[in-house]
């Protein structure tokens, strides 16, 4: 009876396999996530001669950069809020509205496709739809006498971009919120009805309060999603639109701000904003999960 | 209840219109190339362009390598963390969320600064190096989706029992992962793979900033120079995305036990 009884029945070669298996993952994360981000943070706080400085952060508060951030935040906010509301409405209609079951699975499949149909092709699709020669533009003009572009609409604008972003924001909302809507048990509705509640009262006092944390959480996910997007905006408007991703793209391409430190600070600012959005998501999603069983 | 159903149909119809009209309009636009009549000239023009074939096949190859590397990086790590190192799980969850927090544009900026031709690892110094960097970037982009797919797959099988059984039969750890675990979560892995493919195939930002001849930058080039081809390419891209997502659905039906619950 010595120490062999206290040790587990020793699987041979245990340690090397564990380490070998997890090492690629960790190395990968360090090389492609941590180090690049840290290097940007470092650059953001370094001046041209290599000394520590906070001037670059101060430089973010120039008119052009503040305006770029502000337009980005407004477009992301508008497309996130509208996407969340419309997505929730469609999800409720499809899941709770007693529409035929095959329709529901078709809608969810389509959502998977549409939420991934982003980037350059999406911009092309909207140019073909609402551009100056787009089908909808032409139909509105010839059939209804409504000249979209003369009435002030422009696809290459705040609302044009928001309308385009909704094409992937709404389906993303639907995919994320569907489990929560599924979690609303039929019994709750029946119980409410039994106690004399109207449909409106059920949603006001039971349904929406339960869904609310999920909606709020997904809202921040949608915000971050739109905030970091560039391909659609780039293909739609070229480098004309002054949103922060386009500004950063031009900076990476050709040092448009003529200051690498300021460029890094611009990127850091984006991380800070999307992090805030995601922290809200995590906190709220944790609360929301209490109802999902 | 009647009114309820009416509203449901109305909301559904409005939503469907928003999603279907741009597809119809794009398709109609893509047929307008020949004056006065509808034709598939725009598609013919796209397929006749050697740059289309070149950039598309480049992106397909990069996509396939991305999937292979993604599986190699994610599967063993998820397996061993689930089996032996559960305390690492929160750390992995955190890492796999990061690509959703840090915009791709910011990541590629970091890569270009960190791995430029005068650095210790000069990825961007050669074409092959840049391809490797691009693949790494794509694996990173797909990490949240690949991780969740694999993690869901492993949740539905009893990896501890499978591992024990295989060990009793004399298999070593590499054999267990490759011959026991991998086939059992194949459907989940393939779901992650198709999603990865859908993300990578038309990606513009990273490929363009790394100056690689991928499909995304090709699309933007066509968009600035041509009128009708972009619409045709949008339809082609939509069909590709549909195909990838459709495959995930079909796979889910083939193996209901290992599919993630999405609806």
Image (tube, coloured by chain):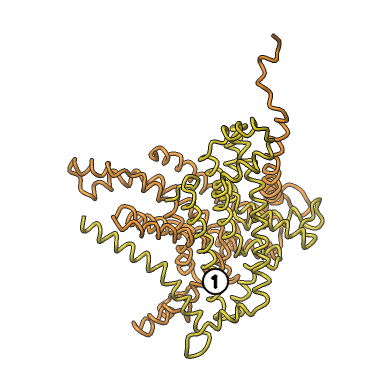
Chain colours: A orange, B yellow
Position of residue A64 measured from the top left corner of the image (x, y, whole percent): 59, 63
- Evaluate whether residue A181 shows in this view: yes
Q: Nearer the viewer, residue A143 or B52?
A: B52
**Which residue lies most toward the bottom here?**
B36
- Evaluate whether residue A78 shows in this view: no
**Circle count:** 1
**Which residue lies most toward the left here?**
A196
Position of residue B40 measured from the top left corner of the image (x, y, whole percent): 53, 82
Position of residue A203 measured from the top left corner of the image (x, y, whole percent): 28, 48
Q: Residue at x 68, y 77 (%)?
A: B50
Position of residue A176 measured from the top left corner of the image (x, y, whole percent): 44, 51
Q: Residues within 10 Å of mark 1 (few under 14, many from 20)?
A: some
Q: Nearer the viewer, residue B31 or A154?
A: B31
Height in image: B23 above or below B179?
Answer: below
Q: Residue at x 63, y 58 (%)?
A: B105
Q: Nearer the viewer, residue A265 or B109?
A: B109
For this view, does B256 lie left or right of residue A270? left
Q: Chain of mark 1?
A: B
For this view, does B110 lie left or right of residue A82? right
Height in image: A166 above or below B175?
Answer: below
Q: Residue at x 49, y 70 (%)?
A: A157
Q: Quadrant of residue A22?
A: top right
Q: Can you say which quadrant of the picture contains the N terminus of chain B? A: bottom left
**Which residue lies most toward the front here?**
B169
Considering the numbered disc 1 on the image, is that residue within a helix, a strand or a loop? helix
For this view, does B263 lie left or right of residue B72? left
Height in image: B187 above or below A114?
Answer: above
Give the labeled residue for mark 1. Answer: B236
């Amino acid at each position: 009876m010595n120490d062999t009884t206290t040790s587990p029945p020793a699987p041979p070669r245990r340690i090397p396999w564990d380490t070998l298996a997890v090492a690629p993952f960790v190395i990968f994360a360090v090389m492609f996530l941590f180090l690049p981000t840290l290097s940007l943070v470092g650059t953001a706080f370094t001046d041209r001669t290599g000394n520590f400085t906070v001037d670059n952060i101060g430089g973010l508060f120039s008119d052009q950069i503040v305006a770029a951030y502000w337009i980005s935040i407004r477009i992301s906010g508008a497309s996130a809020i509208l996407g969340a509301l419309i997505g929730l409405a469609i999800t409720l209609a499809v899941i709770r509205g007693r529409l035929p079951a095959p329709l529901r699975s078709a809608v969810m499949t389509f959502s998977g496709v549409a939420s991934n149909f982003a980037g350059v092709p999406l911009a092309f699709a909207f140019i073909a739809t609402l551009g100056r020669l787009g089908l909808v533009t032409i139909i509105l003009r010839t059939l209804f006498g409504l000249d979209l572009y003369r009435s002030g609409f422009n696809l290459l604008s705040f609302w044009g971009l928001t309308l385009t972003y909704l094409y992937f924001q709404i389906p993303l909302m639907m995919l994320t919120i569907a489990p929560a809507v599924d979690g609303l048990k039929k019994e709750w509705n029946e119980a409410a009805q039994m106690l004399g509640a109207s449909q409106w009262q059920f949603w006001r006092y039971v349904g929406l309060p339960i869904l609310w944390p999920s909606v709020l959480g997904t809202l921040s996910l949608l915000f971050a999603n739109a905030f970091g997007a560039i391909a659609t905006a780039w293909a739609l408007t070229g480098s004309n639109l002054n949103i922060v991703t386009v500004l950063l793209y031009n900076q990476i391409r050709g040092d448009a701000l003529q200051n690498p430190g300021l460029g890094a600070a611009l990127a850091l600012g984006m991380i800070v904003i999307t992090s805030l959005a995601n922290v809200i998501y995590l906190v709220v999603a944790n609360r929301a999960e209490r109802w999902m069983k | 209840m009647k009114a309820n159903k009416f509203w449901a149909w109305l909301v559904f119809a409005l939503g469907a219109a928003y999603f279907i009209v741009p597809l119809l309009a794009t398709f109609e636009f893509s047929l307008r190339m020949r004056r006065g009549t509808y034709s598939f000239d725009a598609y013919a023009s796209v397929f006749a362009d050697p740059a289309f074939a070149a950039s598309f096949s480049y992106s397909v190859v990069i996509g396939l390598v991305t999937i292979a590397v993604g599986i190699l990086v994610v599967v063993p790590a998820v397996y061993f963390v689930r089996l032996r190192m559960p305390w690492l799980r929160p750390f992995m969850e955190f890492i796999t969320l990061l690509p959703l927090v840090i915009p791709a544009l910011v990541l590629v900026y970091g890569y270009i600064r960190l791995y430029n031709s005068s650095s210790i690892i000069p990825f961007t110094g050669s074409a092959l190096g840049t391809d490797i960097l691009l693949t790494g970037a794509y694996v990173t982009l797909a990490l949240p989706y690949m991780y969740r797919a694999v993690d869901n797959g492993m949740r539905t099988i009893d990896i501890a029992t499978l591992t024990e059984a295989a060990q009793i039969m004399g298999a070593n750890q590499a054999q267990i992962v490759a011959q026991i675990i991998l086939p059992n979560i194949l459907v989940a892995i393939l779901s992650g793979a198709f999603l990865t493919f859908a993300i990578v195939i038309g990606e513009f930002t990273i490929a363009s900033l790394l100056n690689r001849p991928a499909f995304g930058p090709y699309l933007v080039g066509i968009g600035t120079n041509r009128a009708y081809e972009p619409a045709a390419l949008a339809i082609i891209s939509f069909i590709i995305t549909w195909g990838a997502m459709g495959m995930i659905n079909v796979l889910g039906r083939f193996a209901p036990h290992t599919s993630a619950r999405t609806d």
